[in-house]
């Protein structure tokens, strides 16, 4: 026995959490959390809720950026991890074929007719990197197209297809990739005519701003890509595994049929990082064309037993609890109730999305008093009003949400798929109160807005 005692260590040092991050990790994270009042101390979590030391519950409408699809600490996933640890498998020998990766691949492919094989990595960005490599090798072409405002990850390859300059700045040179507007088939074909394009990578619903591909776009894009010998990559890292009311978001559109699909986040069960790239047989067979190329693309921790067990348990929970259908039903209810508020609040511009991936967009009001305050916020930094909404949702109503992206007046809701009507009621009631406060023209919300303006101006 060693002297290591995790329970004792946490008891002794948990109070230092923000200081430890400031000293040893990304020092801007605690600074940001302190600035906006998000520096909470959560003691435990279960399902769609966090709890503080006093036992107060906080509704999680963020799901760890989509990781917690089946909720936090689901007992089925926990038991699977206990079981796989107790089994003491001969894991990651590198020179055998364990059953769990094959079983998880088989199960994943059962949700994706037309796709044949899977590569397992460790994250969403790694799943995208795999798809980029496979597409370039399979087509023999160097360039990948992506959509403006896309987010596909932050490692160098996936950063090359990231549509936000704020993430790309300072990290050049990147891969020779080119943006096209989401939904613009003419722009897509102009690039394809150059005959150097390997693939288009696209989120069926963009995480930044929650913008869906127009109806028919994915199918038409696939037809154009194939006409010019290129591939369609669907990035389902956030939209996949039931989030939008179908298992994959591309399945909302008949005959979209991508060549490669990237999966991660929810597949982990919220416990063990895992990424997966699903693809067609011919692509995999071209990449792994001989025994000499057997390790031409691999991952040291890919297909590890804990990740595979978590993935299998997660898919079982989704099937048993019918979470895809629940996401569709609950998402429709939440979106409908929020959309009904648009005519009542001039600062509320639009509610959009699909399933439990919902964007709430704010816009310039009509009345002079509100318009002058809106203009003040926009002059300081676009996105401050959305931040003004997110903060009271947490501080006054104990609901965790996020602004959908830098310089966006959009809040994104991506809660665990286990929420139901009770959570919808709680969110809509809280959001209505926040909107009432915002439209009253005074109070703590606008005082906080002035604080945000001062901070934004000071950091220019």
Image (spheres, rainbow, N blue to C red):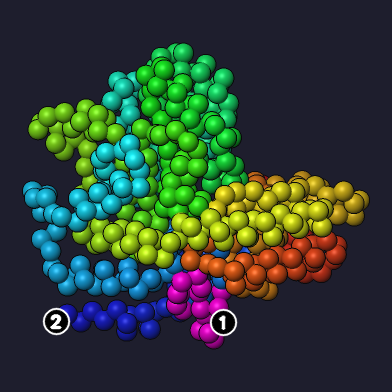
Residue 51 lies in the magenta stretch? yes
Q: Looking at the picture, how far across and down is residue 336, in whole percent? A: 67, 56
Quadrant (top left, top right, bottom left, bottom right) of the N terminus: bottom left
Query: Could you say which is closer to the camera, residue 394 or residue 447?
Result: 394
Nearer-N-terminus badge (2/1)? 2
Residue 10 visible here: yes
Residue, disc 1 = 56
Q: Indicate left or right for 307 with 433 as reference.
A: left
Q: Residue at x 51, y 51 (%)?
A: 244
Judge from the rendering whether residue 268 lies leftward or rightward of residue 192; answer left or right. Answer: left
> Badge 2 local density, few (<14 within 10 Å), some, or many (20+)?
few
Residue 394 vs residue 12: left or right?
Answer: right
Q: Height in image: 318 above or below 149?
A: below
Residue found 45% across the figure and 61% down from its top: 323
On the question of residue 238 being in view, the answer is: no
For residue 292: magenta?
no
| The residue stretch that appears in magenta | 43-58
Q: Residue furthest right?
A: 368
Image vertical order of residue 358 relative to residue 269, above or below: above
Q: Circle 2 is placed at which residue position?
A: 1
């Amino acid at each position: 026995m060693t002297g290591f005692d995790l329970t004792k260590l946490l008891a002794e040092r948990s109070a230092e959490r923000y200081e430890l991050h400031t000293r040893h990790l990304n020092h801007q994270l605690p600074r940001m959390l302190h600035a906006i009042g998000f520096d909470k101390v959560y003691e435990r979590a279960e399902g769609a809720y966090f709890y503080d030391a006093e036992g107060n519950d906080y509704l999680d409408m963020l799901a760890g950026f989509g990781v917690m699809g089946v909720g936090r600490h689901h007992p089925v996933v926990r038991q699977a991890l206990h079981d796989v640890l107790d089994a003491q498998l001969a894991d990651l020998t590198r020179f055998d074929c364990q059953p769990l990766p094959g079983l998880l691949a088989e199960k994943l492919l059962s949700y994706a007719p037309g796709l044949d094989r899977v590569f397992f990595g460790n994250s969403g960005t790694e799943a995208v990197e795999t798809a980029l490599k496979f597409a370039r090798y399979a087509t023999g072409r160097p360039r990948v197209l992506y959509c403006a405002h896309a987010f596909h990850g932050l490692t160098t390859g996936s950063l090359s297809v990231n549509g936000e300059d704020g993430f790309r700045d300072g990290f050049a040179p990147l891969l020779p990739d080119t943006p096209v507007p989401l939904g613009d088939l003419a722009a897509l074909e102009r690039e394809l005519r150059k005959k150097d394009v390997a693939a288009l990578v696209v989120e069926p619903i963009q995480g930044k701003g929650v913008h869906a591909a127009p109806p028919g776009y994915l199918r038409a894009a696939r037809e154009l890509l194939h006409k010019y010998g290129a591939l369609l990559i669907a990035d389902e890292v956030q939209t996949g595994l039931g989030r939008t009311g179908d298992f994959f978001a591309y399945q909302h559109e008949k005959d979209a049929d991508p060549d490669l699909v990237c999966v991660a986040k929810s597949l982990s069960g919220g416990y063990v990082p895992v990424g997966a790239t699903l693809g067609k047989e011919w692509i995999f067979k071209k990449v792994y064309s001989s025994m000499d190329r057997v390790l031409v693309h691999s991952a040291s921790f890919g297909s590890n037993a804990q990740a595979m067990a978590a993935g299998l348990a997660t898919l079982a929970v989704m099937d048993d609890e019918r979470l895809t259908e629940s996401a569709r039903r609950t998402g429709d209810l939440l979106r409908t109730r929020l959309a009904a508020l648009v005519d009542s609040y001039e600062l509320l511009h639009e509610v959009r999305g699909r399933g439990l991936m919902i964007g709430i967009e704010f816009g310039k009001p009509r009345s002079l008093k509100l318009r002058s305050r809106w203009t003040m916020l926009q002059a300081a930094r676009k996105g401050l009003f959305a931040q003004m909404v997110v903060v009271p949702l947490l501080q006054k109503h104990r609901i965790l949400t996020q602004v959908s992206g830098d310089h966006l007046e959009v809040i994104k809701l991506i809660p665990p798929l286990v929420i139901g009507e009770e959570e919808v009621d709680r969110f809509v009631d809280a959001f209505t109160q926040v909107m009432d406060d915002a439209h009253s023209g005074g109070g703590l919300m606008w005082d906080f807005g002035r604080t945000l303006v001062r901070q934004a101006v000071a950091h220019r």
